Amino acid sequence: MSPRRRGAGDQASRPRNTPLLIIFATVVVDLIGFGIVLPILPLWAERFGASPTEIGVLTAVYSLMQFLFAPFWGRLSDRIGRRPVILITLVGSAVSALWIGLAGALWMLFAARILNGISGASYSTAQAYVADVTTREERARGMGMIGAAFGVGFILGPALGAVFSLISPEAPFFAAAALAALNALVAWRLLPESLRPDSAHTPRSRLDLVRRALASRAMAPYIWLSFVATLAFAAMESTFALLGKHRFGYDETRMALLFVVVGVAAAVGQGFLVGRLVDRHGERPVMIAGLAGTALGLGLLAAAQNLAVLLVALVILGVLSGLAFATVTALISKAGGDHEQGGVLGVTASVSAAARIAGPLLGGVLFDHVAPGAPMAAGAALTALCLAGAAWIARGQGAGHPAPAESGRRSSGSEVP
């Protein structure tokens, strides 16, 4: 079944970068809504009597839904097109944010987060959209733009959340719902389909895609790196608001502003640095530098006892983690076949979601039973392990196997072996 294409003649006359800019804008607005909710959700859950461990579970259930649904959305987008999948999930985001704001009990928060996780699993579809509209040489830069969308979302989202939280505790969630609904309407009007009719196909089963991806010598090492790095980051991310409250006495507004700092740093790293650095040095060295900086930032965050150290840690973490995740995603994308980008990136998103299930659970338990900084310290140790693995992979591939980035310059469509 071919995806429905709207105005093919008009699309042919569009400037080359127009679809990339439109998907960037769509993802930015989606992530502004996400950024409104994320910093204040743990504190909102505390109002319903949730413990740090329960807050970790609340975060994990979102990721569980991503784990289950990311391959589904990716495979569906390979069959019917990226555009309808993105539109469906934007509507789901609007409904879930509204539900969180209307929640009257903790179980309602969990139900809303389940729906939010299902609709949030479309991130891999946006990555597949980027893969559709970029060449292999441009892939890291394109993935960096999607990563930069996270940065912009974390600049504007928490700032807006801080403003709306002054109105009422529920107002940020209602604002996120309205923004998601508006985004769906604008995307329905402006977002073109990226999947070519000759690329649409009946995708492989989820189990077959997972098996082939994890058996691929070119792809599997980077998928496992993504898993461990995401696990480390998620353990920190899910408990950071609690760290700010219990160690520094920060409220929702101040925590939202700290997320703005992370967003600015991530936007600089992924929006401006990653493309230039990859052009000069290649994906693997940039990935290794990014992992080293992520480990350093998490370690500083664990040890921070004053605002100055906290800000330095957040800037390092925002810039360098952005470099790491953008390059890992680009390497995975290049190792996959051109007609399976949605499925391959869906598998990757599913593996990352598995890490986001375990990470908040680990972070909540460590925060509850060890120390407020323990989730960040554990994240630093895991990222250091990741760094050692990345160096070993780079040495092994450099010795006898070209990296996907390098082989991609000689081949127009490598397949998963």
Image: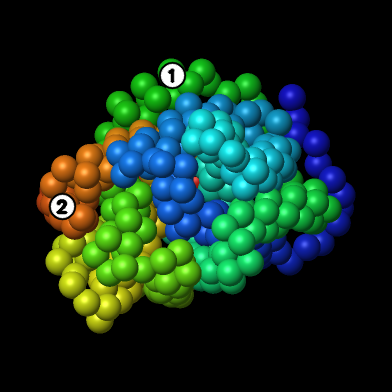
Up-down relation of residue 69 to residue 388 (above or below): above
Q: Nearer the viewer, residue 417 or 84?
A: 84
Which SS class for mark 2?
loop
Residue 364 appears in the figure: yes
Quarter of the image where the C terminus is located: top left
Residue at figure coordinates x 64%, y 34% from the top left: 77
User: Which callout, 1 or 2, points at the residue further toward the start of the chain?
Assistant: 1
- On the picture, is 15 further left or further right than 172? right
Residue 45 percent across, percent down from the top left: 45, 46
Residue 28 sits in quarter: bottom right
Residue 131 appears in the figure: no
Residue at figure coordinates x 63%, y 66% from the top left: 167
Q: Please, what is the three-letter code of the amino acid marked with disc 1?
A: Asp
Residue at figure coordinates x 48%, y 27% from the top left: 68
Residue 211 percent across, percent down from the top left: 36, 22
Marks 1 and 2 close (CB-CB < 8 Å): no
Which SS class for mark 1?
helix
For mark 2, what is the residue? 371
Residue 213 sits in quarter: top left
- On the picture, is 178 further left or further right than 201? right
- On the picture, is 53 further left or further right than 373? right
Up-down relation of residue 12 to residue 318 (above or below): above
Q: Nearer the viewer, residue 293 or 155?
A: 155
Task: Determine crowd level at label 2: few under 14, some 14-19, many 20+ residues with C-alpha closer than 10 A.
Answer: some
Q: Nearer the viewer, residue 280 or 148?
A: 148
Residue 186 sits in quarter: bottom right
Residue 384 percent across, percent down from the top left: 14, 54
For mark 1, what is the residue? 208
